[in-house]
Image (tube, coloured by chain):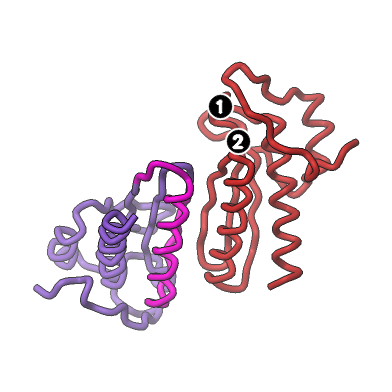
Chain colours: A red, B purple
Amino acid sequence: MEDLTKQPCVACRKDAPPVTDADIAELHPQVPEWQIVVEDGVRQLVREFRFPNFAQALAFTNAVGQLAEEESHHPRIVTEYGRVEVAWWTHKIGDLHRNDFICAAKTDAAFAFFLATS
Amino acid sequence: MEDLTKQPCVACRKDAPPVTDADIAELHPQVPEWQIVVEDGVRQLVREFRFPNFAQALAFTNAVGQLAEEESHHPRIVTEYGRVEVAWWTHKIGDLHRNDFICAAKTDAAFAFFLATS
């Protein structure tokens, strides 16, 4: 099984297939910290990250923002004192796509790098 | 009436008084774009800001973050493609304080500056 962090997001069309239950069984164990939640009928991958203050939370928000721009795929990022919540889903299909699992894995990698360097 | 953007946030204690209806009648007209919403029993000032893309939304998030650090008062900032939502409230009192109206006014000023310079 190829590491998700080594895979790029692919351009996504409106008729791109959402992940199936079989896909989730393969992909979710690679990003086990992420919850699959349903908001307004849309499945999302959501994870909370904790920090000791606001400045570090905002710095991580920027790290995720840089990743998002590189992948041309954009999450919702909630930034608060000591806390960042990231949610990935695919607006074009109103559901989860394989891209979202790739970006969740890359967010985990960004967090590991952030912890190691801050 | 002194311009809210000229006033600093004051250090806030747990027994600091929340804004009264009379305070709101004075302060809210100075930040008319902000909605007073109640979330989990806590009054908050909330405003949405729109942008043409993700990068500008993230840049504005950073402008608000810088303001928050300067005031030592920290909002919740939701960053998405083309959209930033800022919510101010005072965690120590679980309610709205005059500080929140000051920070809302300063956020409006930061947005005006952002639009003029980006």
Q: Is residue A71 above or below residue B12?
A: above
User: Which SS class for mark 1?
Assistant: loop
In terms of depth relative to the viewer, which is nearer, B44 or A117?
A117
User: Which SS class for mark 2?
Assistant: loop
Q: Is residue B15 left or right of residue A61?
A: left
Question: Do circles 1 and 2 both sit on a common chain?
Answer: yes
Q: Is residue B93 above or below residue B85?
A: below
Magenta region, residue range:
B50-79
Q: Is residue A102 above or below residue A53?
A: above
Q: Residue furthest top?
A: A15
The subunit carrying tag 1 is: A
In terms of depth relative to the viewer, which is nearer, B108 or B117?
B117
Q: Is residue A30 above or below residue A80?
A: above
Q: Residues within 10 Å of mark 1 (few under 14, many from 20)?
A: some
In terms of depth relative to the viewer, which is nearer, B82 or A21?
B82
Dominant secondary structure, magenta:
helix
Q: Residue at x 74, y 23 (%)?
A: A20
Q: Are marks 1 and 2 in contact (CB under 8 Å)?
A: yes
Quadrant of the rendered structure where residue B98 is? bottom left
Q: Is residue B3 magenta?
A: no
Give amino acid for label 2.
Trp
The residue that disc 1 covers is A94
Distance in Å between CA atoms under marks 1 and 2: 7 Å
Quadrant of the rendered structure where residue B31 is? bottom left
Q: Is residue B60 magenta?
A: yes
Q: Position of residue A108 (x, y in %)?
A: 73, 53
Q: Residue at x 26, y 63 (%)?
A: B109
Q: Earlier in the sequence, mark 1 or mark 2?
A: 2
Q: Position of residue A63 (x, y in %)?
A: 61, 58
Q: Which mark is residue A89?
A: 2
